[in-house]
Image (cartoon, rainbow, N blue to C red):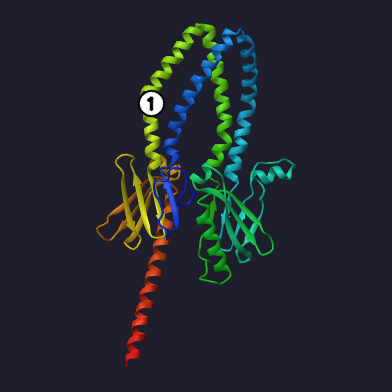
Amino acid sequence: MARGSGLFNPVKLLADETEIVRKRESLRLRGPSWSLLILWMYGLFVVALCIPLERAGLHSVASDVLDVVLIVLAVMAPVLYSLVLLDWLLGTYTLGPQRIYQNSDLAGALRGIGLGSPLAASGGREVEFDQVSRATVEPLPGPWQWFDIGHVVISTRAQARALVLRYMHHPRSLAGEIERNAKAAAGVNGGNGQVAPRRLWRSFAWLFVWVAPGLAFLWGCVAAWIGLRLLAAFGPDAVLLGVFIAALITAVAPFPVAIIAFVNWWVGVYVVTNRRVVAHKGVLNVTERVLSLDDVVSASATKAGLARYLGVGNVQVNTAGPTGVVRMVNISEPDWVRQQVLEVQQRVQQSRRQIEFGEISRRLTRTLHLY
């Protein structure tokens, strides 16, 4: 998400703050239920659209066309969806202590036999950190920014776009980590040889964007096929009444509940900056818990049940004083968030110690001058 901006941003940054992490409850848990409700409403709409076809006498033509389309989709859809899924599963990057590289993936295999693959401009490349000149974020438009997703462009001394990490979660943090590794490799600061390599995945939203339109079209065809069969069995008037009743029942309870849940989800934001940790919840009764990083002493991450296999968990930030704790509930990448909190807390403490040491040095200097 854009720092300090964006659509209906409930947590505003202070003038001297830098955003490190911004999280909401993961859609990997809430998303499927919302998607099923939307698909149900969409299916009712498609069935209603079949009624004019029946009254215009196009029932048989539409039915024959749908039969052909569904047969083609039954053959092609599993293959296409499997290729996209494999492209996401295999299209990963490895961030090591001395270099970053793209792993062998489906896109590279397709290029090898002369076929194209979407978003596969950097397959097979690797970059040594001692050659990196900078790592920058290439922002993406609209909703990608809301969910803090973008490209990370790595440039070397010899090539401006040596490697592009596409559709990465938290691109600014990742770019900062790459630049720190580059400085370490160049000997500007401490070494990074003990850092274990880790795999970087493209955002799950990338997979959703590629799969969702096809699934919506497939479900629309199935709903139209069902609608035409219902029209042949019961007639347009009965089907229209059934669609109206089903839509009314859906709108009375599930849809308002889903809207309220979505609003609560949207305003439930957890933010980590270079100064504080903020948990914001509620619309009418707003609760906002703020912890200063000066008071933070520890952070823990827990994952349990199904959420563990979806990469979702809780992060608890603890303080030594009376300010208490902040719990980030059901967020994605809890281990990464915990690591970010501890790293920025360590940097804050180091900065505070440097300030205190500088003040002690100045006092000693003034004292010695007196004598």
Farthest residue, direction right: 114
* Residue named by callout 1: 254
Farthest residue, direction bottom: 371
Residue 58 sits above or below residue 258 on the image: above
Left or right of 87: which side holds 12? left
In what quadrant of the picture does the C terminus appear?
bottom left
Residue 316 sits above or below residue 195 on the image: above
At a point 75% along the width and 42% down the height, the residue shown is: 114
Query: Total label count?
Result: 1
User: Residue flagged by tag 1: what amino acid is it?
Assistant: Pro
x and y percent of residue 297 in the render? 33, 61
Binning the other alpha carbons within 10 Å of mark 1 as few (below 14), some (14 to 19) or many (20 upward) gives few
Farthest residue, direction left: 322
Left or right of 12: which side holds 139? right
x and y percent of residue 239 in the render? 48, 11
The residue nearer to you, when weighing 104 against 201, is 201
Camera sees residue 204: no
Residue 147 sits above or below residue 175 on the image: above
x and y percent of residue 290 in the render? 32, 54
At a point 53% along the width and 53% down the height, the residue shown is: 171
x and y percent of residue 199 in the render? 54, 52
Camera sees residue 142: yes
At a point 60% along the width and 62% down the height, the residue shown is: 134
SS state under label 1: helix
The residue nearer to you, when weighing 177 against 125, is 177
- Residue 219 is drawn in which quadrant? top right
